[in-house]
Image (spheres, rainbow, N blue to C red):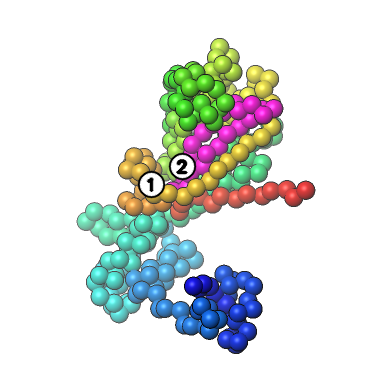
Amino acid sequence: MYVGRCSRIDVKAAPTCRSPALCGRLVGPIGGAVDMPTPPAYLTSAADLRAAILSGELPAGTKLPSESGLMRQYDVNRTVAKWAIAVLKGEGIVEGRAGSGVYVRDTTRLVRHARGRDVRSGDGPTSPFARDAAGAGQHGTWEHHSRHEQADERIAARLGIEPGAPVMRTSYRFLADGEPIQLSVSHEPLALTKDTPIEWPEDSDVKGVVTRMDAIGVRVDEVVERVSLRSATAEEVEALNLPARTFVHTIERTYTAGGTPVETADIVLPGGRYDLVYRLPID
């Protein structure tokens, strides 16, 4: 049985639709159009509040109506009102404040342009994250901790080295205007960087993998990113100040120079705080 969406009203024509995912009505197994089910009341209420928040009608810092207020506003019961707020909390666009109520969070998004993130010269910050934050009118800072360790099998495979080989591990927590917004753990093979000015990533005057590698004569010429979506772990919820049961983007990134991996990182981004933009040339 196939169920898709079709814009054709004539049920006789419906079976010829080539793009069911783009259409406006449901198509049953024999091509007949059927009405879409009415969404649950809590999703309808959440959608209305979300639209008001994203449009700026309810700006950051605005206190939402209480559950009783939402019951009157949408003519729903208390359970529906509670679930509607839970949906918005899960998306990270509102937050509860103990003893005070539920408030709209700052929904300013940083834009991560994958193409052109890594520059070798020019004005402005050399850190890609600092440029992301500046582009959103925010001040980017970060916390970091580096240490020597041995590569496990997963990291060794990504760096093309033997398990147990020495690597530099650096963990980061990035903040925009003091608000945690990104986590990252990077690994670099010490066979490449040991006893160089960039061995300890944050001790160098230049920031960003590309400019740091340039400093030791290694020219990065490719980066591969694998993007996924998953539930945040308890540690990520705490580190990023996220609502429980929320989703995060994960990026598995590896830089290479002449086909040899020089750095690999696991990046975590809150879904509601970042836009991921990919602009790719077409040959």
Q: Is residue 110 above or below residue 5?
A: above
- Read off the residue under disc 1: 232
Q: Is residue 227 above or below residue 14?
A: above
Q: Does 250 sit left or right of 211 as displayed?
A: left
Furthest-right residue in this view: 283
Q: Is residue 210 above or below residue 20?
A: above
Main secondary structure along the magenta-highlighted residues: strand
Could you tell me residue 112's position as x and y percent?
57, 46
Q: Secondary structure at mark 2?
A: strand
Q: Which amino acid is tagged 1?
A: Ala
Q: Is residue 249 magenta?
A: yes
Q: What segment carries the magenta color?
A: 248-270
- Read off the residue under disc 2: 268
Furthest-left residue in this view: 99
Name which of mark 1 and mark 2 comes first in the sequence.
1
Q: Residues within 10 Å of mark 1 (few under 14, many from 20)?
A: many
Q: Is residue 19 above or below residue 148?
A: below
**Looking at this view, is 224 or 2 the one in front?**
2
Q: Which amino acid is tagged 2?
A: Val
